[in-house]
Amino acid sequence: MFKLVRLGDRWPTLILCLLLLGILPIRGEDSKSDPKSTSQAPEKVPPKGQRVFSCGHSFHYFMPPILTDIAKSAGIKDHSFAGLSAIGGSRVIQHWNLPDDKFKSKAALKSGKVDVLTLAPIHLPDDGIEKFAELALEHNPQVRITVQEFWLPFDIYDPAFKERPAKVDHNALNGEQLRKLHATYFETMDEHIRSLNKKFGKDALFVVPVGQAVIALREKIIAGEAPGLKTQEDLFTDPLGHAKPPLEALVAYCHYAVIYRQSPAGLPVPAVIARAKNPQWDEKLNRLLQELAWDAVIHHPLSGVKADAVVK
């Protein structure tokens, strides 16, 4: 049984003490204003920056500086450009066979200071993929090698890469036709990556599904759902299929998603698009490019990324 104590004149003093001790709330305050009682989502910590070296042709070698810009905008301060071997129209083996290690690709890999090596073959066979992967893994067992699956030049499947059509109409094909056209190329490249991972006894090589993302974007254009892009021709500078800024950004977003295993959605318009000063290439188009890149990456079985990817 509690004993009632008469406080008398000591009551104001007791209230003041309780207020100072925080036992009684100050008038007008409630739990919503108490930081300790507010449920806040933890601040997202940017992933660890990667040292990236790239070897590729003209559907690829524009990518590294855009990737650096995207990583910076994502708050990844320690992302670094480790070097670039750029040869137009090249297979990976051509980068390997360069005399005197012209672009220092082998020297960079031998230093062990490369976290990600990006490669861009055209068609198979291409022994350069295996040779570079073997060298990279020898000097850094944790290195990741990414292989870009691209969009077919001239919109034709030509493994010899010698055919030059007299006329190319990038608007002539629909999404279904494009997927059928690319199917054999995608399948052979995927199988090659699987066989190399089996040889190395680990998942060291990953696919960057650029070609799949490009087809998805072309379907959006056909459907009238790509802001600022009226025809498929708006993606390319020439019949071969060299990329205009929106397509360059899409390529870089695909690489960002595979390398950092997180969606680029919500990042600001990259410099490659901003510099074009095309008012129709705005935040809406940028968001579409980000979403298409992420969707292609999370649905490719060899990208190493899942929809619920968590970067450690």
Image: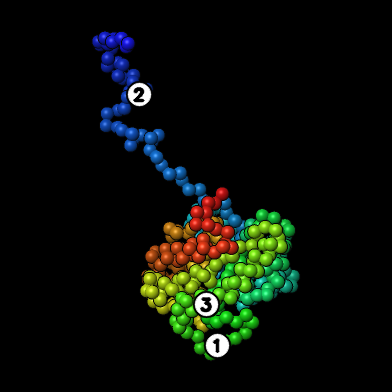
Label 2: how many Cα within 10 Å (few below 14, some 14–19, many 20+): few
Q: Position of residue 248 (x, y in %)?
A: 50, 70
Q: Position of residue 182 (x, y in %)?
A: 55, 76
Which is nearer the eye, 78 or 89? 89
Q: What amino acid type should be assigned to the residue bearing mark 3? A: Lys
Q: Could you say whether the residue bearing mark 3 is in a helix, strand or loop?
A: helix
Q: At x 46% / y 81%, what residue is drawn? A: 173
Which is nearer the eye, 280 or 185? 185
Rounded to the nearest angstrom, the CA distance separating label 2 from label 1 is 82 Å
Instruction: Tell me which corner region of the image, top left, top right, bottom left or bottom right, holds residue 18.
Output: top left
The residue labelled by disc 3 is 180
Q: Position of residue 153 (x, y in %)?
A: 55, 79
Quadrant that contains the N terminus: top left
92 left or right of 249 in image: right
The residue labelled by disc 2 is 23
**Residue at the farthest left position:** 8
Q: What amino acid type should be assigned to the residue bearing mark 2? A: Ile
311 left or right of 116 in image: left
